[in-house]
Structure formats: C-alpha cells, structure tokens
Amino acid sequence: MVRVKICGIKRLEDALAAVDAGAAAIGLNFWRPGRRYVPPEIARVIAHAVPPFVARVGVFADEDAETIRRIADLCALDALQLHGAESPEFCRQFDRPVIKSIKVRGPESVEGLARYRVAALLLDTHMPGAMGGTGRAFDWSLAVRAKEAGPVILSGGLTPENVGEAIQAVAPYAVDVASGVETGGQKDPAKIRAFIARVHEWNAAEVRR
C-alpha cells in the first residue's frame, strides 16, 4: 500500500483537509528561508489538532541537533525529515524515525544511499537554492534503483494527474507532495482530495490483482 504525505502545511485548515482526504502524514517545514516555513508555535497548534494515526513530520535543513530536538518535543513530531547536507552520523543520533531527503541530479545521486541507515529515503528533484516543493520531476527509474537502499518516498513534480503513473513506475513506500496540491501558493482542498483519491485507486487496484 502506497501512503501519502502532504507537505508544506502552514494552516490548521490545510492539515484538516489533508486528514479528511486520507493522508497518512503531514509535513511541517521548519526551514526559515522556505516559503512554506511555519513557526514552531503555530506548528504546535496544528500538530496537536491532528488525530491519532496521522504522522506529524518535521522538515529541517542543516539545523543543529539541539534545535531539532526542541522543536520535535514542542510539536510532538512523529518523525524527522532532514533536507540538507546532513551526514549519516548526524541522521543516526535522534530518538525519532529519520527520513533523509536526497536531491536527485542523476545516477550518481542514488549511489551509496545504504550508508544512511534511516527509516526512509525521500527522493526529490535537485534545484539550486531550493529545499523541495519545486514542482519539477526527475527520472523515476533512479528511484527504482534507490529502493535497494531502503524504503523510498517519491517526491518532486507529483500532481493528481501524474501520481498514478509515478506509482506504477516506482512502487514506492509513499509519495510526498507540496506544490502539486496548491493553487496560488496555498493548499487546495480539491487538489488534495484528487491526489489522494488517485493513490487510493491504485492501492485498490493492487489489492484486486
């Protein structure tokens, strides 16, 4: 079964829209330069409003470990997504599951990923100066290769229109979307529902096979 994470949640209503549509996880971005940054105090309110069995994932990039732990405790985060140049050793020091983001340029980007030994690898498109949410896809065959190193979360350029094709090509553990379910820079409940519905349709078809 492929799971869905709706990333870049900034408002309570966006989180609830994701939950109502059937998301398995929401992403709260704590990277200050990002346009989807959410202050920890607001993220805490959002996180505590999310019902059980929906994971709250904190997104960080090149942040110090003490700050990550403090925000994780404040917001009761279930997992940490590290989106910067964090080393394998850095990733292994936390008491919560870690998702390591890998920015994919080409085949060299998916070499040696097993050294991270994290809960999952999130593959996103490399864009200079961006930490995700670019709306650009990469060569999905590289994600298939990355699965040898552990569970893969597919990200980068996914939309309600292409997520079914992406899942068919990769069969990832999960898919992650931000800009693909936005209109005018804000989360669009209709797009969230459409995106998750496509994933659920694929899951249902797999069960019938």
Image (cartoon, rainbow, N blue to C red):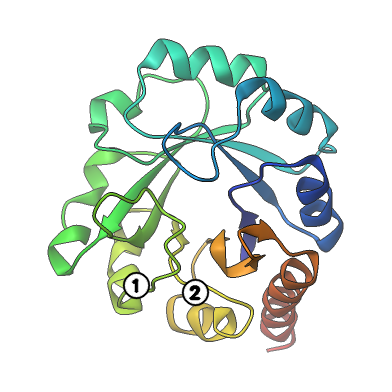
The local secondary structure at tag 2 comes to loop
Please tell me which residue is depicted at 64% across the width and 60% down the height of the picture: 4
Q: Position of residue 204 (x, y in %)?
A: 75, 80
Say above or below: 157 vs 97: below
Which residue carries the number 1 mark?
Answer: 144
Depth check: give the residue in front, 63 or 129.
Answer: 129
Q: Residues within 10 Å of mark 1 (few under 14, many from 20)?
A: some
Residue at figure coordinates x 35%, y 77% from the top left: 140
Position of the C terminus by quadrant: bottom right
Identify the image quadrant of residue 83. Answer: top left
**Quadrant that contains the N terminus:** bottom right
Q: Position of residue 85 (x, y in %)?
A: 24, 37
Q: What distance separates the C-alpha of mark 2 from that of mark 1?
A: 8 Å
Residue drawn where x is 78% and y is 26% of the image: 45
Task: Name the spot of residue 187 as percent of width and height, x first.
Answer: 69, 58
Cβ–Cβ below 8 Å for labels 2 and 1? yes
Q: Residue furthest front?
A: 184
What's the amino acid at mark 2? Ala
Which image quadrant is residue 28 in?
A: top right
Q: Which residue is the site of mark 2?
A: 171
Q: At which x and y percent is residue 130? A: 34, 51
Whether residue 96 can be seen here: yes
Mark 1, secondary structure of its residue: helix
Q: Is residue 52 left or right of residue 192?
A: right
Mark 2: give few (<14), some (14-19) or many (20+) Cα within 10 Å.
Answer: some
The mark tally for this picture is: 2
Where 205 falls versus 45 (above or below)?
A: below
**Residue at image x 22%, y 60%?**
110
Q: Residue 102 versus residue 157: which sits nearer the camera?
A: 157
Residue type at tag 1: Val
| 53 left or right of 149 in image | right
